[in-house]
Each structure stands twice: as structure tokens, then as C-alpha cells.
């Protein structure tokens, strides 16, 4: 055998590789729960970096996909978002990070999420008030049919 040729087995398939032509690449290994950062294109040529975790993997045949749950922690709000990274993904990059590198405070994020919960609860109360007003004042337009719906 040629000194530059090497036999490798990948997923049960043996291949002969000419090492002079082989590309050397680093292989990143991710597992569910790993802390990561994503770099996501925003508007124009601006990019934002967000902290996240590997939430899962979708083993599709054509496009295996890494699912990243990341935290958009802005001035007044904290949003959990998802990025789906595969061979077709554009404008999103992923890299490993250390949990000690987190630039977010747990209590700060929880306070922002609690504020969002309070806002949504107030929206629900407002919608219930509007519904009650509608049921009380719009009966003349619908007659008895409106009572049957309730």
C-alpha cells in the first residue's frame, strides 16, 4: 500500500484515503445541554451574540439540524428564542462557551420574565372586560343567539 494512503471506516463503510489530498479540519462535538453562544445577523451588517444551550438534534437525512435555545437579553425584556442550525442556515454561527463566561444574571432574567407574565395577565383581564362589555351591550344586534354561544 502507498505510504500516503490510509484505510478508514466511517459508519461501517471502509474507504481508502490519499492523505496528501485529505483536508484537516477540527471537529466540534456538541451534546444536549452544552452551553453555547450564537452569532446572529440582525439588521444590515450588524451581528448580535447571544448565550444559549443545545436543546436537541433533529436527525433528518438531508439536513441534520442542531436546535439551540438562546436568550435574547435586552434592556427591558428577556426572550427565549430558538435557532435551527444545519447546512442551509445562513447568518447564524455557533460556538462553545463556558458557563463562567455568562454575561447574564439569573435574577435579572427572571425579573424580566416575571414582568412579561404580569403584562400578559393584564392583557387577559382587559380582554375579559371587553368580552363582558360585548355580551352586555351588543345583545340587541344578535338577539338570543349570543346567549346560546356563552
Image (cartoon, rainbow, N blue to C red):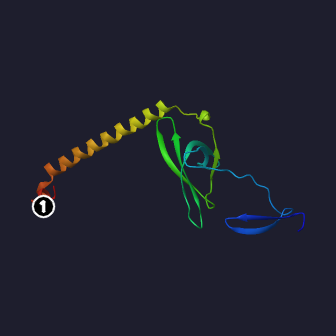
Q: Position of residue 146 (x, y in %)?
A: 14, 58
Total number of numbered labels? Answer: 1
What secondary structure is marked by label 1?
Answer: helix
Quarter of the image where the N terminus is located: bottom right
Seen at 84% across and 63% down, the residue is 21
Give the answer, above or below, for where 63 lies relative to 66.
below
Residue 115 pos. (x, y %): 39, 35
Along the line of sight, the residue nearer the viewer: 116 or 110 = 110
Q: Residue 33 sits in which quadrant?
A: top right
27 vs 125: above or below = below
Q: Residue furthest right?
A: 3
Alpha-carbon neighbours of circle 1 within 10 Å: few (<14), some, or many (≥20)? few
Task: Looking at the picture, tell me which residue is in the foreground, 109 or 48.
Answer: 109
Q: Is residue 2 left or right of residue 148?
A: right
* Horizontal side, residue 60 vs residue 16: left or right: left
Residue 63, percent across and down? 59, 64
Q: Residue at x 22, y 44 (%)?
A: 129
Task: Residue at 76% x, 54% y: name it.
Answer: 25
Quarter containing the C terminus: bottom left
Residue 3: percent from left, percent from top? 90, 63
Q: Nearer the viewer, residue 115 or 146?
A: 115
- Residue corresponding to mark 1: 145
Amino acid at each position: 500500500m502507498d505510504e500516503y494512503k490510509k484505510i478508514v471506516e466511517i459508519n461501517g463503510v471502509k474507504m481508502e484515503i490519499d492523505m496528501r489530498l485529505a483536508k484537516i479540519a477540527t471537529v466540534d462535538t456538541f451534546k444536549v445541554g452544552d452551553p453555547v453562544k450564537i452569532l446572529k445577523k440582525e439588521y444590515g451588517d450588524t451581528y448580535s451574540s447571544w448565550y444559549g444551550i443545545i436543546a436537541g438534534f433533529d436527525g433528518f437525512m438531508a439536513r441534520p439540524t442542531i436546535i439551540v435555545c438562546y436568550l435574547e437579553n435586552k434592556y427591558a425584556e428577556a426572550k427565549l428564542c430558538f435557532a435551527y442550525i444545519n447546512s442551509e442556515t445562513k447568518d447564524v454561527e455557533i460556538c462553545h462557551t463556558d458557563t463562567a463566561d455568562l454575561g447574564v444574571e439569573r435574577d435579572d432574567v427572571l425579573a424580566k420574565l416575571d414582568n412579561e407574565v404580569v403584562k400578559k395577565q393584564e392583557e387577559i383581564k382587559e380582554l375579559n372586560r371587553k368580552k363582558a362589555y360585548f355580551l352586555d351591550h351588543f345583545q340587541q344586534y344578535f338577539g338570543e343567539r349570543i346567549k346560546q354561544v356563552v
